[in-house]
Amino acid sequence: MTYFDEVVSRLNIDDISLLTLLQECGANRIVKGMTKEDFKIESVKLDTQFSEATIRSSLSKLEALLLIERDSSSKHHKFIITSYGVMALEYHLEGEMI
């Protein structure tokens, strides 16, 4: 098992859900990045309703693992999914199919 596999296998459902939201909303460029408020709005639409603490915790973890990036040039930070984040989602989808 590679280091990447080990790290990604330890992501929880909230982490995967936030990565999935970024992917589905096309947040792969700063222009299309999502703020914390965007996460709240989208989660309400999907009936998942993440708490503020859950969003903050998962975003910090995902950023530390380089699965997402933060654009802090504006007042409301925007988050985008990185290529590693996309690979992490693919890893989890493959695992669910087995």
Image: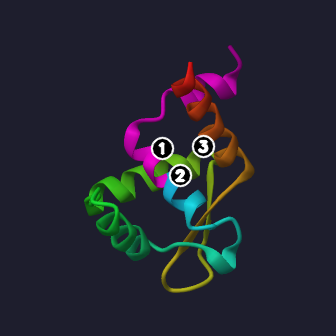
Label 1 sits on a secondary structure element that is helix
Name the residue tied to disc 3.
65
Residue 43 within the segment the image draws in magenta: no
- Residue 36, quarter of picture: bottom left
Amino acid found under the numbered disc labelled 3: Leu
Tag 2–tag 1 contact (CB < 8 Å): yes
Direction front: furthest residue: 97
Name the residue tied to disc 2.
19
Name the residue tied to disc 1.
16
Side of 3 where 72 appears, left or right = left
Side of 15 where 69 appears, left or right = right
Please tell me which residue lies in front, 85 or 53. Answer: 85
Amino acid found under the numbered disc labelled 1: Ile
In percent of width and height, residue 90 lies at 65, 38
Magenta-colored span: 1-18
Q: Residue at 50% x, 86% y: name it.
A: 75
In the rendered image, the quadrant that contains the N terminus is top right
In percent of width and height, residue 94 lies at 62, 28
Eyeballing the image, is 31 above or below 18?
below
Q: Mark 3 to mark 2: distance in Å?
A: 12 Å
Side of 15 where 33 appears, left or right = right
Residue 4 within the segment the image draws in magenta: yes
Q: Residue at 68% x, 75% y: name it.
A: 30
Eyeballing the image, is 82 above or below 61?
below
- Residue 73, quarter of picture: bottom right
